[in-house]
Image (cartoon, rainbow, N blue to C red):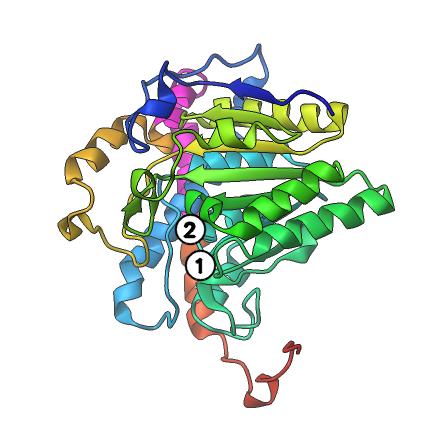
Amino acid sequence: MKDATIVNRHSRPGLSSVRPHAVPAVQLHECGPDGDAALQLDLYRKMYLIRAAELLIQKHYPEDEMKTPMHMSMGEEAIVVGICHALKPDDQVLGTYRSHGVYLAKTGETDRFFAEMYGRASGCSGGKAGSMHLFAPQAGLICTSAIVASHIPVAVGAAFANKVAGNGRVVAAFFGDGAIDEGAFWESLNMACLRKLPVLFVCQDNGFAVHTPAAERHGYRDIAAIVGQYDCTVFASDSTDVHALHGLAQDALRAMRKDERPCFLHLKYYRYLEHVGVFEDFNAGYRPRGEFEAWQSVDPLRLQRTRLASMILEEQIRDAEARIERQVQRSLEKAREAPFPEVSALCGGVFA
């Protein structure tokens, strides 16, 4: 068995001993030579698409036409975009009930996305699943799941199938730090390491399982150190810089293919809104508003926009933003006009 490897990137000394939601130091990692502007703009576009779509949801959700619980992705855009952009188009991903970021980063489409939010037949899951169970196999999104950690064994199964088929596909499973508390995670990690499966385990650590902080749930201080005892390569970062996280994902994927074993990414971020819903929850008493305000200094979109301002014209940035805003607005309006599923379709796609 190869020695476990932990690569701690973009972090401050003593990261494991600080509060999970401590604000990382602002640091924009240097870009490559000429020609990098196109990549940086593409990364920004993908993050802006997620933010614009969710701001529109936040605006219209109180109208009570979207009959689905909402678990918003604001704050995690750099993670999902950085990793999904590093994947090949036919690589596969799975996500949690906090699914908007993963779906939009992997597919880039908003018509079926908004139709699903409104429960319409043209939705990505036929209007039956709502926000938590999104599905886009044609784009490599196997599924997202509302049951904590339930999709992680599915990711291992998909990776096993890919290995048997010899198709070279990687499977990325996104999950929160709350999933670490579930046996399904450890069983899946063990199987992936034992069988040397091409699984990218992505822990999006916001420091809370609903309202409970990690310090009240974990009998250890460092997730990465525990996982590092398995036969996998571990990367850790508290950066919100999409360029840095994209580079980290590329390093992880190269390590997976070279060493033929899984990788685990421990990535910290701050959840902007309530656990479920579209509003703030600082009056709930488990975290102060000041934390959120401090994290705005390292907001992933703000950081990337600052980088772009030194590479391209402001007019180009605004044009990209305006195009995305028009796209999501058209998709929302189209969804509102779309028909609901027929009653005859009620039991379709239901399996024992």
Query: 241 or 175, which is in the foreground?
Result: 175
Residue 162 vs 86, above or below: the answer is below
> Tag on residue 330?
1
| Residue 278 coordinates in the image, percent (x, y) | 29, 56
Label 1: how many Cα within 10 Å (few below 14, some 14–19, many 20+): some
Query: 247 or 47, which is in the foreground?
Result: 247
Could you say which quadrant of the image residue 201 lies in? top right
Could you say which quadrant of the image residue 351 lies in? bottom right
Residue 39 vs 351, above or below: the answer is above
Is disc 2 placed on a helix, strand or loop? helix
- Whether residue 323 appears in this view of the structure is no
Residue 129 relative to residue 259: left or right: left
Magenta residues?
303-326
> Tag on residue 204?
none
User: What residue is at 56 percent from the left and 22 percent from the top?
Assistant: 247
Q: What quarter of the picture does the N terminus occupy?
A: top right
| Residue 159 coordinates in the image, percent (x, y) | 73, 46
Q: CA distance from mark 2 to mark 1?
A: 6 Å
Q: Are marks 2 and 1 in contact (CB under 8 Å)?
A: yes
| Residue 282 coordinates in the image, percent (x, y) | 17, 47
Q: What quarter of the picture does the C terminus occupy?
A: bottom right
User: What residue is at 49 percent from the left and 61 percent from the top?
Assistant: 147
Q: Is residue 318 magenta?
A: yes
Q: Residue furthest right?
A: 165
Which three-letter amino acid code belongs to the residue tagged 1?
Arg
Q: Main secondary structure of the magenta part?
A: helix
Residue 254 relative to residue 14: left or right: right
> Tag on residue 326?
2
Residue 303 vs 51, above or below: the answer is above
Label 2: how many Cα within 10 Å (few below 14, some 14–19, many 20+): few
Query: 274 or 246, which is in the foreground?
Result: 274
Which three-letter amino acid code belongs to the residue tagged 2?
Arg
